[in-house]
Image: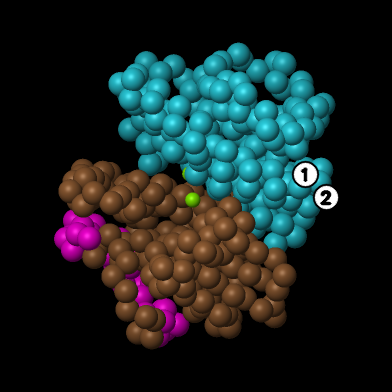
Chain colours: A brown, B cyan
Amino acid sequence: MPHYKLTYFNLRGRAEIIRYLFAFSGIKYEDHRIEQADWPKIKPTIPFGKIPILQVDGVTLHQSLAIARYLAKETGLAGQTPLEQALVDAIVDTTDDFMSMFPWGEKNQDVKQQIFNDLLTNTAPGLLRDLESFLGDQKWLVGKTVTWADFYWDVCSTTLLFLKPDLTDNYPKLLALKERVQALPAITAWIQQRPKTTL
Amino acid sequence: MPHYKLTYFNLRGRAEIIRYLFAFSGIKYEDHRIEQADWPKIKPTIPFGKIPILQVDGVTLHQSLAIARYLAKETGLAGQTPLEQALVDAIVDTTDDFMSMFPWGEKNQDVKQQIFNDLLTNTAPGLLRDLESFLGDQKWLVGKTVTWADFYWDVCSTTLLFLKPDLTDNYPKLLALKERVQALPAITAWIQQRPKTTL
Ligand SMILES: [Mg+2]
Ligand SMILES: [Mg+2]
């Protein structure tokens, strides 16, 4: 088993999907959390200057979803067939496209609040309606078993629900899916033990 | 071999990486190009309301990069090992993050031009420097053989160079990589025969 070292801020953010995959699979890793204040001196040492990164023995992987997909394939959570894997990837990217619309780093708090409100109130319902309809009466988003697309829904919706607690009130199937993910024993345990952060 | 039907606008845009993979592998597909005027009536019939989609026998795949990765795996262009595949995915997502910063649909032409100029002049050099340094003296971005990350660099940079013809002047290795991709006989042939569009 390689030595895995994950580097990110002390946030769930873009690293939490990776931490879910480690938690679920039981693979040991170093969950290295850096201080925001140290980021400017660390950034130039990292390929492409962004975190999370995952160091796998000598190799540095970047891009949260590329890292997550790598771990999902290693642990059987990527989808059972090539077509299922493509659907998993598509659901993840569709969810991620929405998360990436938020101006997380915007300094002007009025501007930030206004865009956040607009996305949560006017844009989110379209995505949630489509995801709910894609899920339908299936237990998991793609195929017969849990995949990292289900994990990503839980990770992202946890942050969205922190921002807008009634966000999923009209989407009972998506809410039930979230509960199923959080009821997986390794995920339940991880949520209890992880550092508490707002994002 | 399944029947493949690709649906997109008559643009390179987000479908061109998929067309490159079909061209390179020689797999037959239907390159269905819709008129912009027909999009409003087609959009509600498409899961998640975005194109490109790829119909594979009965299954509809969405999200351009998920579709491209599916084809890349089918045709041996996804990377030779799990770690190489993760690096390919990461390079693709890093390139795509930059392409996604452009407000392609902005109606106000002054605003659009100003943001485009800022991205091309001030943001692009950081990405190009990092990509050039990642490539180094290798022939291809990841591993010993061509992958869809190389194709994606060519596809995206073709559009970027249309917008700013001197964009890659300081990045001779990236420019040489682009030439290597375009010199692959199946890609040369596709570029000659494809419908000519600006984007
Ligand atoms: Mg995307
Ligand atoms: Mg991304």
Q: Provide the chain ID for the residue under circle 2.
A: B
Q: Residue furthest front?
A: A41
Q: Which residue is mark 2?
A: B144
Residue B187 visible in this rendered orientation of the protein: yes
At mark 2, the secondary structure is loop
Picture coordinates of residue B69 (x, y %)?
A: 62, 46
Q: Which range is magenta? A: A163-191
Residue shown at 47%/64% (left/top)?
A39
Picture coordinates of residue A136 (x, y %)?
A: 34, 55
Q: Amino acid at mark 2?
A: Lys
The CA distance from mark 1 to mark 2 is 7 Å
Residue shown at 70%/73% (left/top)?
A57
Picture coordinates of residue B18 (x, y %)?
A: 61, 35
At mark 1, the secondary structure is loop
Q: Nearer the viewer, residue B197 or B174?
A: B174
Q: Which residue is mark 1?
A: B140
Q: Amino acid at mark 1?
A: Trp
